[in-house]
């Protein structure tokens, strides 16, 4: 009669890594999405990253904020922004910020934030 062999034991370290690594990846993804300027709505505040490697980021309105969103226009092409001046209807606009892909994106009309 054959005796059942014990199931191979999984290393606790491998189990922890198999659980923790995916959770970290998901957490980082959620954080990056939530702090992206592309998710900003009217009234939200942004910090100016000042470079393409560090673009605008959504932050809590306070000492770290540079701008407040006064207008959000969706489905705009980047090349039509300079021609149409879409933020004219938001008179406090000092800066515009566009984010998207080649076909369309979102334009944020921003005013300076003063805490």
Image: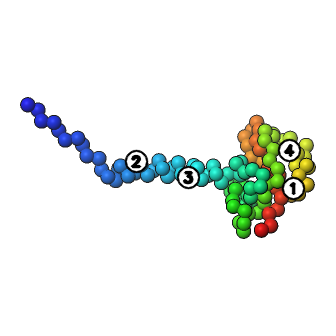
Tell me how far mark 4 sits from mark 3, CA to CA: 32 Å
Question: What label sits on residue 93 in the rendered view?
Answer: 1
The disc, 4 or 3, on the residue closer to the chain's N-terminal end is: 3
Question: 51 left or right of 1?
Answer: right
Secondary structure under tag 2 reads helix
- Image quadrant where residue 112 sits: bottom right
Image coords of residue 4 (percent x, y): 16, 36
Image coords of residue 17 (percent x, y): 40, 51
Tell me how far mark 4 sits from mark 1, CA to CA: 14 Å
Discs 4/2, front? 2
The disc, 4 or 2, on the residue closer to the chain's N-terminal end is: 2
Which residue is at 91% across, 49% downward?
88
- Which residue is disc 2 drawn over? 18
Classify 21 as above or below 79. below
Image coords of residue 15 (percent x, y): 35, 49
Which residue is at 86% across, 41% downward?
80
Question: 18 left or right of 6?
Answer: right
- Residue 32 visible within the image: yes
Tell me how far mark 3 sits from mark 1, CA to CA: 32 Å
Secondary structure under tag 3 reads helix
Tell me how far mark 1 sits from mark 2, CA to CA: 48 Å
Question: What label sits on residue 28 in the rendered view?
Answer: 3
Structural crowding at the residue carrying mark 3, measured as other residues with C-alpha within 10 Å and reported as few (<14), some (14–19) or many (≥20):
few
Structural crowding at the residue carrying mark 1, measured as other residues with C-alpha within 10 Å and reported as few (<14), some (14–19) or many (≥20):
some
Which residue is at 81% across, 39% downward?
77
Tell me how far mark 4 sits from mark 2, CA to CA: 47 Å
Question: What label sits on residue 81 in the rendered view?
Answer: 4
- Residue 50 visible within the image: no
Classify 58 as above or below 115. above
């Amino acid at each position: 009669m054959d005796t059942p062999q014990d199931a191979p034991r999984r290393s606790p370290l491998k189990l922890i890594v198999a659980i923790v690594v995916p959770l970290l990846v998901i957490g980082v993804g959620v954080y990056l999405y939530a702090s992206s300027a592309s998710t900003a709505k009217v009234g939200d505040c942004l910090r100016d990253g000042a470079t393409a490697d560090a673009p605008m980021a959504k932050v809590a309105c306070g000492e770290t904020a540079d701008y407040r969103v006064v207008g959000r226009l969706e489905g705009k092409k980047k090349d039509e922004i300079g021609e149409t001046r879409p933020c004219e209807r938001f008179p406090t606009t000092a800066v515009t910020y566009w984010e998207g892909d080649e076909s369309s994106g979102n334009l944020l009309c921003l005013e300076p934030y003063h805490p």
